[in-house]
Image (cartoon, rainbow, N blue to C red):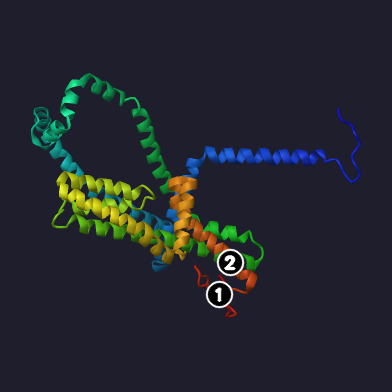
């Protein structure tokens, strides 16, 4: 054991300090482990929070218009309206798909016979590509592969069950957040004893909520533009794909999904166009290539710059960084997070250089109450 005396000016570190440092490291590790284990629940909470912020103004509007309606009934009415809209969209998809599916089942035996005989479009395609001969020569191997596909069926069912549970959980969380929102906000603000600080936190929170609402409205506007342009392309005389409105609606809804949404919608539309004709497939392929460039480099930066009040360059950089860090969820949260950071930074700047004006604002055009423009 080393018992050499301490050099002049040195002192021993107390055992209590060492124990506290070790305890903080262990507590941080446990907290990170807990976050990792419940990451799926945290994602559900974040998505529910976005729905809450989007629906909160609608509930408030209904509550102000119908003062005799309690908040619980106003919240229930808005959520029922959302459910009706979602059910209508699902019906718009399911009914045509069911009709086409029934017709396909009736034609399936004839299609199989034609394919085996090398007749019809499918048979000619299989014969030209040599796929028909390959299928006939490797029937046992194909049958074994089909049998092996049943192995991950349990995993697929678990994924579907988890998805359903997630949707229900998000819906319930959003409903409770909207219903109990005023009480939660009031209780949180009451923790702050200083009136001016309490008002400052309230204004910054309102600005942050405006940023998130602006992102949601901007994203919806981009999806509407995408759906309308897709419908117009599908109805061109050289294309004229059946169920153009249904396909365009699917493309618009899929476009709401960050990263993969636009690609998923394009795949479905191109598949429908390819089944219709080769000319339609080529035209729609060119359309989606051009539209993706338009949306990624013009529509998204410009629209989100106006709704979230972010510089277009900031929008693009925040998306790229967030995608690299957190994938799809990062892409979904990148712009709202950048907007919230901007609101907080500008609030700190304004309070460091003068008294802010009475009405809170979002964006780069903040003006101080004494008339001096806030520097950027």
* Quadrant position of the C terminus in the picture: bottom right
The part of the image, by quadrant, that contains residue 25 is top right
- Does residue 224 lie above or below 23 as drawn? below
| Residue at the disc numbered 2 | 347
Q: Residue lying at the far top in this picture: please name it.
A: 140
- Image quadrant in which the N terminus is located: top right
Q: What separation in Å lies between label 2 and label 1 (alpha carbons)?
A: 13 Å
Residue 260 percent coordinates (x, y): 36, 47
- Residues 55 and 163: in front is 163
Q: Nearer the viewer, residue 132 or 151?
A: 132
Picture quadrant where residue 64 is located: bottom left
Residue 70 visible (yes or no): no
Residue 30 visible here: yes
| Viewer-proximal residue among 87 and 262 | 262
Secondary element under disc 1, as helix, strand or loop, is: loop
N-terminal of the two: label 2 or label 1? 2
Label 2 CA crowd tier, 10 Å (few <14, some 14–19, many 20+): many
According to the picture, the residue beneath numbered tag 1 turns out to be 358
Question: Is 216 left, or right, of 115 in this rendering?
Answer: right
Q: How many marks?
A: 2
Q: Say which element carries label 2.
A: helix
The residue located at (73%, 41%) in the rendering is 21
- For label 1, the crowd category at 10 Å Cα-Cα, with few meaning under 14, some 14 to 19 and many 20 or more, is few
In contact (CB < 8 Å): disc 2 and disc 1: no
Q: Residue at x 23, y 47 (%)?
A: 270
């Amino acid at each position: 054991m080393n018992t050499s005396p301490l050099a002049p000016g040195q002192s021993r570190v107390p055992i209590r300090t060492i124990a506290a440092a070790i305890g903080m490291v262990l507590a941080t590790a446990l907290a990170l482990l807990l976050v990792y284990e419940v990451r799926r629940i945290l994602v559900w909470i974040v998505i529910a929070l976005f729905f809450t912020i989007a629906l909160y103004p609608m509930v408030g509007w209904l509550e102000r218009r119908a003062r005799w309606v309690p908040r619980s009934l106003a919240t229930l009415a808005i959520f029922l309206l959302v459910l009706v809209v979602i059910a209508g969209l699902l019906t718009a998809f399911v009914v045509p798909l069911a009709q086409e599916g029934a017709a396909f089942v009736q034609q399936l035996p004839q299609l199989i016979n034609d394919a085996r005989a090398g007749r019809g479009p499918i048979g000619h395609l299989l014969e030209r590509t040599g796929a028909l001969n390959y299928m006939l020569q490797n029937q046992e191997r194909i049958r074994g592969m089909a049998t092996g596909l049943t192995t991950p069926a349990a995993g697929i069912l678990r994924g579907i069950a988890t998805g359903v549970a997630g949707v229900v959980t998000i819906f319930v969380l959003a409903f409770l957040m909207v219903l109990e929102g005023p009480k939660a906000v009031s209780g949180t603000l009451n923790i702050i004893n200083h009136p001016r600080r309490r008002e400052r936190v309230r204004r910054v929170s309102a600005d942050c909520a405006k940023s998130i609402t602006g992102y949601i409205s901007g994203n919806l506007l981009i999806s509407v533009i995408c759906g309308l342009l897709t419908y117009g392309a599908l109805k061109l005389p050289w294309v004229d794909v059946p169920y153009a409105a249904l396909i365009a609606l699917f493309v618009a809804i899929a476009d709401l999904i960050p990263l993969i949404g636009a690609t998923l919608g394009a795949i479905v539309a191109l598949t429908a166009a390819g089944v219709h004709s080769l000319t339609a497939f080529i035209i729609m392929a060119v359309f989606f290539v051009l539209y993706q460039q338009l949306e990624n480099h013009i529509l998204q930066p410009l629209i989100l710059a106006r709704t979230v009040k972010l510089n277009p360059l900031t929008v693009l950089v925040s998306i790229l960084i967030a995608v690299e860090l957190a994938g799809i969820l990062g892409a979904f949260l990148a712009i709202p997070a950048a907007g919230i950071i901007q609101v907080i930074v500008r609030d700190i700047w304004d309070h460091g250089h003068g008294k802010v004006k009475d009405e809170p604002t979002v964006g780069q055009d903040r003006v101080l109450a004494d008339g001096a423009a806030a520097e950027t």
